Amino acid sequence: MAKTEEIHLPVSQLQKGITVKLPLSWTDHPFLFNKIEITSDAQIQMIQKLGVPYVILLSGTLKSAKSVNAPAPRVQKKSINQLTEQEQQARKHMRQSQTQFVGSINGIRGVLGKVVSDPEGAIREASVLVEAMLEQLYGAENVKLALVTSGEAHPTATQHGVSVAALSMMIAKNLQMSKPEIRTIATGALLHDIGKFKVPEAIRNKRGPLTVPEKNFIAMHPNYGYEMLKRSGLYGDDVLDIVLHHHEFVDGSGYPNGLKGHEISKTTQIVSLVNDYDSFLWRDEIASPQIALGYLFKTRSEQHSDELIQALVKILGIYPPGTLVKLTDNTFAKVVVTTDDVKHPQVWCCQPDGSKGHYRFLPQEDVSVDSVIKLEDLSEGARKTLRLNTGISFYFCHQ
C-alpha cells in the first residue's frame, strides 16, 4: 500500500478545527504532544512563535486555504542540530514563558469566576497561582521580560492583569522588596480590575470615546472590586488597598479618593504605575513599548514616583520586548526577549518585504540593533510577518 503524501501547511494558514503535527522533537515545543487539535487562537499564536515554516496537516477541512499542497516556504532557519546549547536553552525558556503566561491567564480566569459563588475556592486558587508566579520569578538568577501573547487582538482583563502582575513583581524584586510584599503586589495586580465585571460590557469594551456618564461608570470599578472582595472577608487590607487605589496618583489627581504621596502605599504605587503603562501599550496611536515609555515620561511624570519610574525603565531596558528595530544587516525585527547585552536581544526577524520570517538569537551573531523604527516604516508584508496585531504583554523569562 502506497504511503500517503504528507500535506505541509504553512503556519500562516493555521485555522481552528484542524489537527496538525509539529515537525519538531517533543523537547522543542511547549505542547504535551506533537499532534495538536487546534481549538483556539492562542494555540495558533504559540505554533507561529516556534519559528517553523510549516506543520503537517493530519485532519480537518480548511476554509479558503490557498495552495495547501504547495511546497512550504523556504526560510533562513537553523536546524535543531545546528543550534548552540545557549540558543537551544533560550528558545526553550521563551516557549516556557509563553506557556506559563497562558496558564496564568487561565488560572486567574478561574479565580474571577469563583470570587462571588465560591470565595474560599477563589482565594485558594489565587494563592496557588501567586506562588507559582513567585517560583517563576525566583527560579533563576537572571530573569528578564519576554514578549508574550494570549492570541487576542484586544486586551482582556485577565491578560492585562497577568502582564501587570509580572512587570510589577519584577520592579518590586529589583527594589529588593520582601517576598510577602511581592506576594501582595501579585495578588492585588491579578485582581485589580475585578470591579470592571460589574460595568456593562458595552461600556467596558467600547473602542471609541466614552461619554461622561460612561466614564463615571468606569471610574467606579475600583469601588466595585473593593466591595466585592471585602465582602468575603478573606483578603488582607494590603491587597484590598491595591484594588481600591490602583488609579491613585502621587500628585493627588487620581481616583477614587484623590490620595497624595505617602498616603498611597508603595505596593499600590507600583501597581498604579504599571497599570498606567500597560494601558498605553494597547492604544492604537502608540502601539510600541518604547513610545509608551516616552508618553509616560511626557504626560505622567508628576503622577508617579521618580524612583518607581526609574525602576520601570531599568526593567524594560533600552529595547523593551515588542520594540520594532532595524538590524545592522538591514533586516527588520521585533524584540521578543531582552538580554544583558542590550544591542543583541532575541528577536523575530524578516526581510523588508516580510519574507523569510524567523527567530534569531543575536548574542550568537555578528549582527546587532541599528535603530528603532516606527510602524509606518514597515511594509504590509513585514507588519504581517512580525505579527503586530497581537498586542504587547510581558512575562518572566529565564536567561
Image (tube, rainbow, N blue to C red):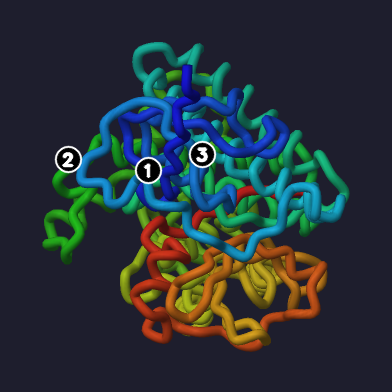
Q: Which amino acid does label 1 sit on?
A: Leu
Which structural element holds mark 1?
Answer: loop
Q: Where is residue 241 in the image (x, y as percent from the top left)?
A: 52, 42
Q: Which residue is drawn at 84% across and 44% down?
A: 140
Q: Quadrant of residue 196?
A: top left
Determine which of the numbered discs, if any, sits on residue 190 in the image: 3
How far apart marks 1 and 3 lie (CA) works out to 31 Å
**Viewer-nearest of labels 1 and 3?**
1
Look at mark 1 in the image and give the residue it sits on. 14
Foreground residue among 69 and 93: 69
- Residue 323 is left or right of residue 85, and the answer is left
Determine which of the numbered discs, if any, sits on residue 236 in the image: none
- Residue 171 is left or right of residue 141, and the answer is left
Q: Residue at x 47, y 52 (%)?
A: 72
**Viewer-nearest of labels 2 and 1?**
1
> Which circle's residue, 3 or 2, is located before the other in the chain?
3
Foreground residue among 250 and 62: 62
Q: Where is residue 75 in the image (x, y as percent from the top left)?
A: 57, 62
Q: Which residue is drawn at 69% across and 72% down?
A: 317
Q: Position of residue 55 (x, y in %)?
A: 49, 41
